[in-house]
Image: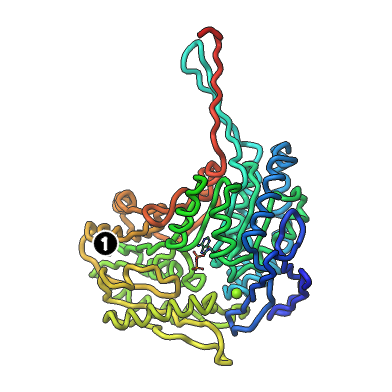
Amino acid sequence: MSHIANLTAPNGINYTQPLGLFIDNEWVASKKEDRIISINPADESEICSEEAAGSEDVDIAVNAARRAFDGKWREMDTSFRGDLLHKLATLVEQHADVLATIDAWDNGKTYNAARNEDVPDSVAILKYYAGWADKIHGTVIEPNPSRMAYTSREPIGVCGAIIPWNFPLVNIVTKLGPALAAGNTLVVKVAEQTPLSALYFANLVKEAGFPRGVVNVLNGMGREAGTAIAAHPGIDMISFTGSTPTGREILKTAAVNMKRVILETGGKSPLIVFKDADLEQAVRWGHRGIMSNQGQVCSATSRIFVHEDVYDRFLALYKDEVQKVSQVGDPFKEDTFQGPQVSKAQFDRVSSYIDTGKREGAKLLCGGEACKNMSGKGLYIAPTVFTDVSDSMTISRDEVFGPFVVISKFNEEKEAIKRANDSVFGLGAAVFTRDISRALSVSKKIESGTVWINSSNDSDGRVPFGGFKQSGIGLELGELGLAAYTISKSVFINLNSKL
Ligand code: ADP
Ligand code: MG
């Protein structure tokens, strides 16, 4: 079987798609002779099939990453490491149309979102960490006249990265950028639902000039390749983004050799609208905050709490906004806001929560059903809004991960905070008010890694991102996201050399 395919995407773009495992800068076949079929969720047609890594392939990739770590990569001038990351950023920019096309095709996200958000965000993250590569250093500490110590920030070693399917490209560079800037090497397992853009990206890694073995990219199933990475004794650190149950499993598996672990997991993020808020803006953000990316965003503001005095007006405006903005359809069509869910499994999951909401007696403001494209195919869900929900309902507690939001009313500020915090998750939270003191004091009391004041789901590669509670361990992005990929070594110097 060949490791490349010449493909023509639905938008007419013709390109060469790698299909193999990327190990040691080469495209190779899987030792277990297994393949994964990629599906276009817009019509459930087959795109192509790729090599699927098993534990033996993971082992080969880890050895390649170890050789690279112990070899040239370690000895490389740090500025040169930054140059390579810059080159990679430039290549991603040059290949933006193809990368966006692949993600729209494979994931079902709109081409516009992929081209205008995912790709530029990825470029910005790579450039940001490229700039850090030669600015990583320790400190000098002088406890008393006879002793001094210095610290150095060293790379951790071979890092495993396990990537989800919701932002295929952004997720890979979020881990690759800081890992490489800090001097680590990588074995990446991409999500089996959306491997194609990462495989294409791997060719750009090679073209940028990274030495062999520094970056290895494997497509494979979570249970096989993912577990093999989490368990591998030759991997020193693991960075995972995905669901909370999978994160918990990885944490347990990674305990074998006490890997450093970063987990970015689920959420059920609240958005609170106080009665003094700019209601129209709250509605617009409240809509984008959950309906963007087909609702497949870990920090989506999926629980909306509205002050009772403005509740009815909020609902009326929210319904208008959904009808006006949430155009569901072909990801490649210019005016589409929402494409299909990524996979049949996700489609079924969201559908079953819709049934649960109805069974639990929540009121349906709009949506509440699947919708098909013109040919009667595709994994489309109508944007679904349940109102008058209670906090104990399953649909108020579980992460749905779809275009699915629950809205309820509150009376007191204290009550809103308590209910917002009543979740096992703590990823994001949004607060809408014109009162600055209230905005800041509520932000202080909210148990989440990020708070947005008068917006929702703002993110930036320069700002750290991570979860409180069961939304994760550790941070990504920003300077703290870089620190996670280094380990500090302390060296003591005895200045008087006598015991
Ligand atoms: P989803 O259920 O939506 O696919 P997951 O959190 O399970 O979300 O998947 C995120 C990533 O974790 C994917 O790359 C997936 O293959 C991987 N994965 C899934 N299960 C495991 C596991 N048990 N060990 C390691 N990785 C896994
Ligand atoms: Mg797919």
Q: Position of residue 198 (x, y in %)?
A: 66, 63
Q: Where is residue 431 in the image (x, y as percent from the top left)?
A: 35, 59
Q: Where is residue 138 in the image (x, y as percent from the top left)?
A: 57, 30
Is residue 464 visible to us here? no
For mark 1, what is the residue? 419
Residue under the point 36% across and 53% down: 469
Q: Describe residue 216's horizontal placement relative to residue 373 as left or right.
A: right
Q: Quadrant of residue 109?
A: bottom right
* Residue type highlighted by circle 1: Arg
Q: Describe residue 154's horizontal placement relative to residue 17 as left or right.
A: left
At mark 1, the secondary structure is helix
Query: Which of the pair 203/492 is nearer the observer?
Result: 492
Q: Position of residue 418 (x, y in %)?
A: 25, 58
Residue 190, relative to residue 261: is it above or below? below
Residue under the point 25% across and 69% down: 392
Is residue 497 visible to us here? yes
Residue under the point 78% across and 55% down: 207
